[in-house]
Amino acid sequence: MKKFDKERLLLAVAGPVIALAVAFVLSAIVLLASGKSPFEPFALMFEQLGFSDIQVLIINQASMYYIAALAVAIGFRMNLFNIGVDGQYQLGAMMAAVVGAHVNLPAALQVPLLLLTAVLTGAFWSGIAGVLKVTRGVSEVVATIMLNAIATSVIAYMWLPNVFGVKAGNNNTTGEMSESGWIPGISLGDAGEIYGLVLLAVLLGIGYWIVLNRTRFGFDLRASGASTTAAAASGVDPKRMVLTAMLISGGIAGLAGLPILLGDSHTYDLNFPTGIGFLGIGIALLGRNSPVGIAFAALLWAWLDKASPELDFHGYDKEIAVIMQGLIVLSVVVSYEAVREWGLRRQQRRVGAELAAGHVLGAQNTKEVAGR
């Protein structure tokens, strides 16, 4: 491996490693300050990795985190902050649940219909922010935050019994979906069942990498994110790329809730997971918008979620996992900036050394010519 490639790999890995190390240390300090052991909680959570049922829970949860983080990462690569992934995936899941409860087609048609419903719903919701940005200059951050609030109200409206809601005791639901829309999982016996749509998360990750790194569209997307002026000079329409990126981001976000919807709950109710879109932001940051990095970050987040309940049985607050997630996000921002500055200094020193070497070589050549 060339020296330059090694340096690039080092810069790519250094940020996440430093962020995780700092987060662990700060979490230990918080525990120590509260009079608790700074090491036992982490040991207890690491022990959970040895249980097959916890492993299944981690993989299932990570699949949803991964899809949400990919949606955020697409926006990041375009220099857009799609903070509305949370509303987009919830609306996508709600609409898929409603369609699944009122339409009963053969599985070969029902499943694609539900996937398409979720994608189009998420894309439509993010597209509103995209249109506002390219036509009126409205910040996508402000627009998507407001759309998250509106999405919550839309969901509450759709839960009304005279709309699409079905009362189940004190729970609001959309009714059970037709079985033709259920996606069977991978059974692991007593350990449980891995969601079938975990495979969809894998395919989305592969597709994300191919599109961004092996297609003209991916190049235009990255170029527009780096510099809209330079992209426009090369013939790329920045406004079209902004709208396209928002639509794709929202479309993928719409799929984030489907692993559990089609693989387990089969209805959208008050117990449906919320907040996945916001967690996707931290996961995308930690994974540096790389499909492989995001996968590891999603597994880490899922492990913190699923292993932390064990702490309650040993006198520790499981919220230590939430504290650690927050510290990771803060540490990521600081460590990435520090690594970036370090990389720039190394690059400047290398360029300076090459220029100095070129100057010396030129002087030697001049002496040789003069001596002839």
Image: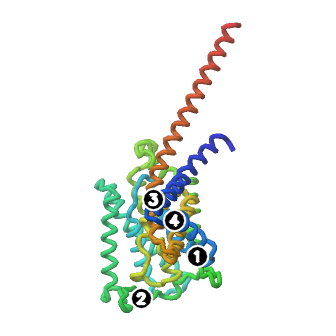
The relative height of residue 241 versus residue 205 in the rendered view (above or below) is: above
Q: Residue furthest right?
A: 372
Estimate the spatial distance between the alpha carbons at disc 4 and disc 3, rounded to whole Å: 18 Å
Figure coloring? rainbow
Horizontal placement of 270 versus 15: left or right? left
Q: Earlier in the sequence, mark 3 or mark 2?
A: 2
Instruction: Assign the N terminus to one quadrant of the image.
Output: top right
**Are circles 4 and 3 on residues that touch, CB within 8 Å?**
no
Residue 54's tag is 1
Dot 3 amino acid type: Leu
The local crowd at label 1, few if under 14, some if 14 to 19, many if 20 or more residues have their Cα within 10 Å, is: some
The Cα atoms of the two marked residues, 3 and 2, are separated by 39 Å
Task: Tell me which label, 4 or 1, sits earlier in the chain.
Answer: 4
Q: State the CA–CA distance, disc 1 to disc 3.
A: 24 Å
Q: Badge 2, how many Cα within 10 Å: few under 14, some, many 20+? A: many
Q: Is residue 296 above or below residue 92?
A: above
Residue 166: where, in percent of width, then height? 37, 89
4 or 2: tag closer to the N-terminus: 4
Alpha-carbon span between mark 1 and mark 2:
29 Å
Picture coordinates of residue 156, whole percent (x, y): 32, 79
Which residue is nearer to you in this view: 336 or 196?
336
Residue 175, numbered label: 2
**Foreground mark, 1 or 2?**
1
Q: Determine which of the numbered discs, if any, sits on residue 327 in the image.
A: 3
Is residue 355 visible in this depiction of the protein?
yes
* SS category of the residue bearing label 2: loop
**Identity, as a three-letter code, of the amino acid under mark 1:** Ile
User: In the visual, does 86 lie left or right of 186?
Assistant: left
Q: CA distance from mark 4 to mark 1?
A: 24 Å
Q: Which residue is mark 4?
A: 37
Label 4 SS: loop
